[in-house]
Image (spheres, rainbow, N blue to C red):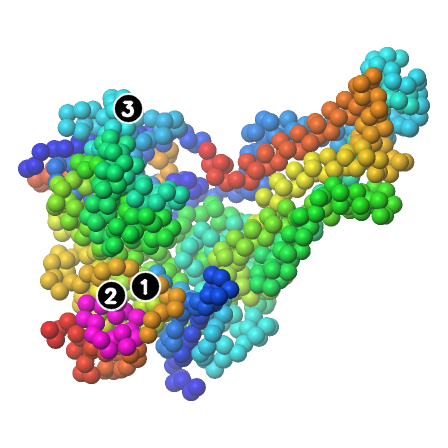
Amino acid sequence: MSDSESTTQAGPPPADMDEIFVEHPFRQFVAMYFRNYAAVAGLLVFVTIVGAALFAPMILDLDPFEMVDEPLLRPGEGGHLLGTDNLGRDLFIAIVYGARVTMAVGGAAAGITLFIGLTIGAMAGFYRGWVDEVLMRVTEFFQVLPPLLLAMVLVALFSPTLETVAISIGVVSWTGVARLARAEFLRLREQEFVKAARSIGARDRRIIWLVIMPNALPPLIVNAALTVGIAILFEAALSFLGLSDPNVMSWGKLIGDNRDYLLDAPWTVTFPGVAIFLTVLAMSLIGDGLTDAFNPKLRER
Amino acid sequence: MAKTLLSVEGLAVEFDTRDGVARVIDDLSISLAEGETLGIVGESGCGKSMTALSIMGLVPIPPGRIAAGRIFLDDEDLLQASEARMREVRGNEISMIFQEPMTSLNPVYSIGNQIAETARLHEGLSRADAFQRALEMLVAVGIPAADKRIHEFPHQMSGGMRQRVMIAMALACQPRVLIADEPTTALDVTVQAQIFDLLNDLKDRTGTAIIMITHDMGAIAEMAQRVVVMYAGRVVEQADVDQILTDPRHPYTQGLIRCVPHLTQNPTKERPPLLEIPGVVPPLTQLGSGCPFAPRCQYADAQCRAEMPPTKAIDDGHTVACWLTEREAAA
Amino acid sequence: MNAPDNVLLDVQHLKVHFQLPRKNIFAKASRVHAVDDVSFQVRRGTTMGIVGESGSGKTTTALAVMRLTHITDGSMYLGDTDLVELQGEALRQARARMQIIFQDPYSSLNPRVRAGAIVREPMDLMNIGAPGERDGRVAELFKKVGLRPEQQALFPHQFSGGQRQRIGVARALSTQPELVVCDEPVSALDVAIQAQILNLLRSLQEEFGLTYLFISHDLGVVQYMCDEIAVMYLGQIVEQADRISLFTEPLHPYTWALLSAVPSADPAVRDRADRVRLMGDPPSPIDPPPGCRFAGRCPFAEARCTAETPSLRPIRDGHAVACHLVTDDGVPPQRQS
């Protein structure tokens, strides 16, 4: 009933037939995503921020570090939309430029997380046995380390550049992805289409990457969206603690630089904070929307 | 003829779906006499399970809706009954067992607890009495060492034992009607035989009437006295079990009997191809005005595709909804 | 092993055991005896059926023949090829000669691959036929299994269960295999659809001279499909015979119980007085006790049944049984008393 069968037309019905309609799953997926309004709002926020991060610096050609006016001007004063910070830098411009760094670090960290987690989880889940044992013990080792502390140590050991920050965040947060990927692989490897692939002569590499992986990805993609949000929070925390590249502007750095003026000039901390909040919220909503869109059970309603 | 216990008259159930309104049950009339086993048979998607849910008052509304009809238990119309009254009816008067006994049992309570809880809820027994009742029920459904197994949890039992527990739970309040929805589909054939014996035995002892839902004509033959054949939400044929098996009139009934290789004791060398029913059950949102089986029927003609056949009594208690029989009768 | 020429698959003393993890470090590790010393042969162009209930090891036997599970002991020959010794690339190449049709048409097709690609994939992987001819071959296979060529563009979820099983059949045939293992090919399908697939499998067998190893729990289906039948119980074959003698003269008490348990639409069968009802469930295949594995549920069991394991011995031409109580001239226990 839930299949895409349609009635057979008049005339002798051919055996077991249905009407041809080729709807690519991706189209259905998009349609399903856009049914979730919160997810659409999240996507809008995300696109706005990414757009601003990409294009504003090209169009504006400003230096976010330039001290343009008196310090700690209120929002609106002196023509500065969101006011100025403790060094007299325009907060709006700083936030727009900071978006670039924040999104880049967030995205890169999420990418590294996904890469490490997926590889380790896939190997453990596919090969099981001693490979699984070893990899899961390694995973547990990383899991019990306090992530922020470990990231701080890594950044402090190496130079506090953007790359180091992104890699550090990736290195401390891949364990969740690894466990999820392992669980998916353990589940999927028992499916008959995996046995079928083996019986038609597919090699391990093909089974892992082309047969199981595309089926394991949906929950991992959802997880990746959430990971971007978490990575952004991490980056903010590290910057706040002063562990970030002093030569690039980021939201966490803005909050960190202005934390001493929290009581006198709350806007200097609030606006970058709101920017972080909105971005993480957007990622979370997108994650929700993706879950719905990937879930075929909901699709039928 | 025994007294009619439960009767469904002109029931229609509709569901709102993305593709429009699906009439999952259309003009369904069946009746169940005291102490009788009624078999409902058909492919999946033909409305068997929905019939059971309608009787239990468990049709999800929305997206479902009862569009027409009445369901009488004795003289009470269950469709008019309040939700509180229906809760009383379920368990006390009508119980149901399902196909998959694992998912129907709560994994975190012992089976004794679950049966006792049902008895406490419906009959207000004390804790000790309810537990005693649970033990009696487990003995009654043939669970060996029931006094020990009463403390076990569902995952510790085999599929057959779990189905016995489900039956014990369903019968804990001595209902008058037991609805069994494919109760043995998940079980091995030797265990299925045990469950059938158990159900027949319980029916003889307690007089509980049974509605048995299945796709297996063999199971119908073993269990039922009367048979209702459903297709696309409609009753296409209804008769005593022997009439259905020896003289099926509707092409769909004939197909259901002959499309399955039946085990025989004297197989021959020749094995003629099985009769095929081509195609699949059509989506219920796209039924035309004609007989819903017409697109798959080898005898279908223009009239079959255009007009719904009326239900016609051809013999004592034997009704068929098919233009073929209609025309034969006229000729 | 020198099998007669017409034997395609020769399985001897096959064992598949699984080690269970220890419950604690002092506990003895348990072993699941999924398949325990099973021997049978499948002749070219015929259908060998393996029938049994859950836990009987029939599916594990099928997977072992396909080399999709590990093999503890025993030998298996496909023609002259030793299937047990094959490893790596040689095994991969040999897979073209044997294919499997799975039970569940919903989980046996990769949901993210179009139907046409599913059928073409084995040819690409095994390098069968010229690449340019493969599309034509896919279209031909679609026609052979009763699908329309334009349905190649659809994804599995757009087909009904019966149609998906047809895709599974087309995929299995695409490598032009000698042996096709059918693992419960119709048990997940609606009753009215089963006949379509069974008829299809038989007409394909006739057309291509296929050899089937047919696994099923449904005795009616086995009776209709198979020329030779082995009845399995807890990892062992308890009775093996050709189609006619197994159903007309079952010898093993378990076979008899199995036959009487099938609900029958035939009143004469239903009212037979000698129908046997088994008590209890099949015991677990974990660390099975010595003796006959059926002894615990057997209505005729004697002391020696729990002491000595009966071996599968031929009673008459092509009919073998593993039961102490069956006499050498083929009288089953229930008819003696």
- Position of residue A189 measured from the top left corner of the image (x, y, whole percent): 53, 57
Helix, strand or loop at mark 3: helix
Tell me the subunit letter for badge 1. C
Pointer 1 residue: C283
Pointer 3 residue: B84
Q: Does the magenta stretch include residue C186?
A: no
- Position of residue A251 measured from the top left corner of the image (x, y, whole percent): 80, 30
Dot 2 surroundings within 10 Å: few (below 14), some, or many (20 or more)? some
Labels 2 and 3 positioned on one and the same chain = no
Q: Label 2 vs label 3: CA separation? A: 47 Å
Pointer 2 residue: C297
Amino acid type, mark 2: Arg
Helix, strand or loop at mark 2: helix
Which residue occupies the extreme bottom position in the image? C2
Image quarter hosting the C terminus of chain C:
bottom left
Labels 3 and 1 positioned on one and the same chain = no
Q: Label 1 vs label 2: CA separation? A: 9 Å
Q: Is residue C305 magenta?
A: yes
User: Residue at the location (87% across, 38% down)?
Assistant: A245
User: Residue at the location (59% across, 48% down)?
Assistant: A180
Amino acid type, mark 1: Pro
